[in-house]
Image (cartoon, helix red, strand yellow):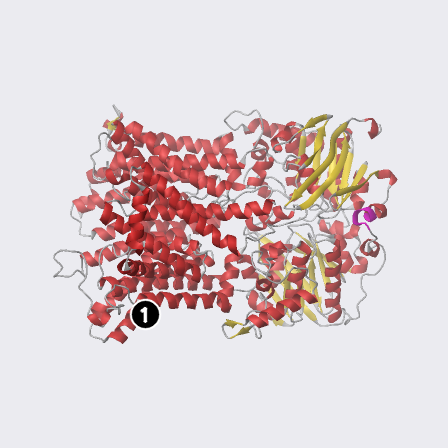
Amino acid sequence: MTEASAVVRWRERMPLRVERTLEPSLTVRILVPIVSIILALLTGAILILVSGENPIAVYRAMARGAFGDRYGVAETLVKAIPLLLTGLGVAIAFRMQLWNIGAEGQLYLGAIFATGTALFLFPDWPAVPLITAMILAGLIGGAVWGLIPGVLRAWTGANETIVSLMLNYVAILFSEYLVHGPWKNPQGFGFPGTEQFPEAAWLPRYGTYRVHLGLVFGLVAAVVLWVILRRTRWGYELAVTGENPRAARYAGMRTRRNIILVMALSGALAGLAGMSEVAGVGHQLQRNLSPGYGYTAIIVAWLGRLHPAGIVLVSFLLAALLVGGDQLQMGMGLPAAVAPMLQGTILFFLLGGEVLTRWRLARR
Amino acid sequence: MSEVWTTDFLTAVLAAAIPAGTAILFACLGELLAERAGVLNLGVEGMMLMGALGGFAFCYWTDSAWIGAIGALAAGAAMATIHAVLTVSLRANQVVSGLALTLFGTGLSSYLGRNLVGKPAPDRFSDLAIPVLHEIPGLGRILFDQDALVYISFVLVPLLWLWVYRTRQGLELRAVGERPEAADAMGLSVTGLRYAYVIVGGALAGLGGAAISLGTNPGWTEGMTAGRGWIAVALVIFAGWNPARAALGAYLFGGVEAAQFRLQSIGIGVSPFFLNMLPYLFTILVLVLATGEAARRRIGAPAALGRPYLREERG
Amino acid sequence: MTQAEQPLAVELRGITKRFAGVVANDDVTFEARFGEVHALVGENGAGKSTLMSILAGLYRPDAGTIRVAGEVVTFRSPRDSIARGIGMVYQHFMLVEPFTVAENMLLGKEGQGTWLETAAIEREIDELGRRYGLAVDPRARIWQLSVGEQQRVEILRLLERGARILILDEPTAVLTPQESAGLIRTLRELAADGFSIIFISHKLDEVLAVADRVTVMRRGRVVASVEAAATTKHDLARLMVGRELASFVEHEGEAPREGTGPSPTTSAPVLELSGVGAMGDRGVPALTDVNLQVREGEILGIAGVAGNGQRELEQVVTGLRPVTTGTVRIAGRDVTNCSPAEISAAGVAHIPEDRLADGLIPSMDLTGNAILREYRRPPIARGPFLISQAIASFADRLLRDYDVKAPNRHVKVRTLSGGNQQKLLIGRELTGSPRLIVAVHPTRGVDVGATETIHAILRAQRARGAATLLISEDLDEILALSDRVAVLFGGRIVGDLPAAAATPDRLGLLMAGVTTQEAGAAVHD
């Protein structure tokens, strides 16, 4: 007897089978993330207080950094772009219960491929074809890095969580190798990084701010993903496979093929994030390209309930948290790590909140 | 190139492999216990970081590495308690909760440790040569000229092996991970046992962190575990949930780490970035091989791993 | 000795238990004495298992008192119940599969030291086994044992823990008639030794054979408690369902076939298996040289004790398990080792054994479940896209045609009752008039009303000309529906009889591996 059927039989033994009758209502589903964020901020405040700082001052500095002026809002948008793209990528894999936590590495690979295209493959091309080529390169780079755990999971059953995570370290080390070694800018005064891209490879920006075309990539990707998930056969297959892989198999869905495709798509979106970071923000490949966008993406996806619209919203919120954290470091000399700490806490409350709601309702 | 194969070089690598592997070993044994009880905890990295920080902080305040080690155990256990509440009592998704724990631990340790970065360690676990035994040629230097945490791990591995396979408590542990319904019907507390093993597992991960911050790299820096927690998670699978094999795997990883430094020091021309990749690539390889083998032999994962247990489950 | 002189073993008074607002036990009063076998009967969902789980300490009642041997007790966990000498053999055994028999006996046993002491317990297992006819190898691992042997381990474990009150939840459901007879002998012996045996069942023949007294439950309440000698099967059946039931009359004479479809003996074969072999999950042969034909307008029933190749047969026919030897043909076309999608497209409907695990997506709404077979085809799909209006009208039609009772089509499938889930599944599978229906335990865990509907649907499909492969452990169901009955034993077809020749006795012998020729002399390996 397989594990899954054992569970079901164990449940079936219960007389008068009644499942959790009440689904949490829409209000509750929206309320839980909001309350989670509030409780997480309160918990964070306690931790900050205990460590001898004034939480109100800390939060005020963060909020001012993220929303205080047009520059802050623009910076928040800049950081929201990679979070949005990686969050969407992670979410589509999660939909199929594939725990791709390798968005970070996939982002790096996208950045590396795009950089190679801009600096070494077609450095003389004009803007439109060059940027198009870079987009493709970024998508492919990320997809390749997503395919590795996908293929291993589909054919050997190797746990994609750990494989994709290990590949993060490999990708980051590989990019370090490039910027310290063969791709290093000879005029870089010893700073590890490539040369600047030709201007044709720069993504257009909005006015004098750093917000760039990547924002459009992210919003378009969100819409496309929504259509795929809600309106296509393939999206339906993903949902069925994620909710009940055995039913998917019974219905003749090609699970292995879908695992590979989803992981490739998931990686491609993260790769696009990497491309838009190098082409839109840095205009070169450099060390510490990402402050962990790929990990934050996991929270973006979960907090956004794996729904494209939710992910758009949450990526802006968490970007604000990151910008606020940076401001903290610059303004108050506190580590920017307040941001991941708060992210983890939000996730704890969200997980607890979700289950508590369902449980209370079931008992009534 | 011939330098690599001298006895002296190999002895040096093996002697360094053991302390390097010990941090991973503690974390791996902890995760092994939690998984045997049916709870997957992907928060090992976060718990190790908190352990590394807690260990160093307590040592810094009290000038005693031993009190530091106790602090590390407590920090790891406290972190694991969060995971236990969420996954055992509230039956939250174990994967997401574990990831949250890693994020939280990474952030919290870096925030709380901001004033300890770069501070000198007042005490550490330094090598204690065991009289007589350490004079055995080769072996003596590898096994009997190590720090106290290493000796503790030498004792812990056989003890845990006996615990899991030869004691009543081990039988209960395995039953809870294999078939919680059966354990429950036999009057065992599934919740209690899962809490206990998740928390003990966290304490061991914390101790693993201290093995770095008070042992191999005394001091505190952000993210100093550098992914060892994840390697520990992968190793549990490689070890087939067996403590003895976990030790073997951990020392293998320690060996890769140690060999890397030594190869560099004798000027073998491989880019350090590629050498650094080796443990991660090796983990993937191990995972692929171990998964295939496990599937063939039907040994392996506790049947209820990752599955919450609820007696009056209605849906 | 009359049972009335024996002291009361358990006394449950006014027991009420609700789950998420649904009353599973409603003011139930129940008594059992030492020295008697007391049967507790009722339909699925009547509340028998809940009541006994309360007695075993697994659930806590919302109201009511429990007395054991005259004393009021409160059970906080199974441990408390075990301490009072109560032991339960669950329908799904509470054994840890990778453990040995001895290790399972040691699990949770009081008064042990830290080290596992297997030698002593192994001796004890041998001793108890000899005394009550429950022999089993103490060093064998559970997964190596037959279902009957696993059940013995469960009973031995209770005896070893000093249980005086044994509760058995549908113990014969998984046994051959011969194994059941052995179990019944053991239970009578235990009762004679002064044990109190509570026997949950819905098989009335068996109940009358083993029990001294019978308590009948219906919809969470006790409706009668009678001496077994003073009642009949017919009376009990009426008490259980609260009305006369056609199916109880049916297999006592009336021919099962009433359709007017093509005559199955002359019509074309839809499913043909020749020389089919397949491996089980453990990599040992699970099917060997299986030859079968199902014709248009025919229902072929597959009888057999669980684990004799039924699951593998189902999966081989539906493309979920590779065939190692032989061929599978559907409507003359060779579909050996075709994918499930290709086989489905060839006109095969599949009603799997475990509907929530395999057939439905419990966390999706009704529409998502309804289109699982049709989502690739127009009008539901146009190119790669799904058409919402087409989905809605398709789902609504399905719910109406197959009498699926649901508030609307957006509720999650897991909120439906078992019967409505099954009707939804069957309706979906029968869309597009399949040539072949593979139905596995189609009425398991389904209430009486839905069972009748489902049987009527299957008969209507036969009348339409569909071929049906009906795999069931419920002999009554097989006898009520089938035109022919084949018996699986040890992965082989050991008998293929027309319905008229398939008497329960004859099938029972075949199910136990006694071939027709051997006539009970030799036992098949």
Residue B230 magenta-highlighted: no
* Along the viewing direction, whichever of A264 and A250 lies nearer the viewer: A264
* Along the viewing direction, whichever of C449 and A217 lies nearer the viewer: A217
**Which residue corresponds to the image point at 48% horizontal and 54% vertical from the top-left?**
A30
* Along the viewing direction, whichever of C259 and A156 lies nearer the viewer: C259
Residue A136 placement (x, y as % from top left): 32, 70
Where is the C terminus of chain A found, in terms of image quarters? top right
Residue B312: image quadrant is top right
For residue C195, say whether it is visible.
yes
B174 lies left or right of C310: left
**Which residue corresponds to the image point at 80% horizontal and 64% vertical from the top-left?**
C257
Q: Which residue is mark 1?
A: A136
Residue C407 placement (x, y as % from top left): 65, 59
**Which residue corresponds to the image point at 51% horizontal and 34% vertical from the top-left?**
B192
Residue C379: image quadrant is bottom right
- The amino acid type of the residue labelled 1 equals Leu
**Figure check: B79 above or below C388:** above
Residue B125: image quadrant is top left
For residue B252, say whether it is visible.
no
Q: Which residues are magenta?
A: C237-242
Mark 1 surroundings within 10 Å by alpha-carbon count, few (fewer than 14), some (14 through 19), many (20 or more): some
Instruction: Name the element at disc 1.
Output: helix
**Which residue corresponds to the image point at 62% horizontal and 29% vertical from the top-left?**
C80
Q: Chain of mark 1?
A: A
**Figure check: A28 above or below B196:** below
C514 lies left or right of A71: right
Residue C104 placement (x, y as % from top left): 58, 35
Magenta part, dominant SS: helix
Q: Residue furthest right?
A: C230
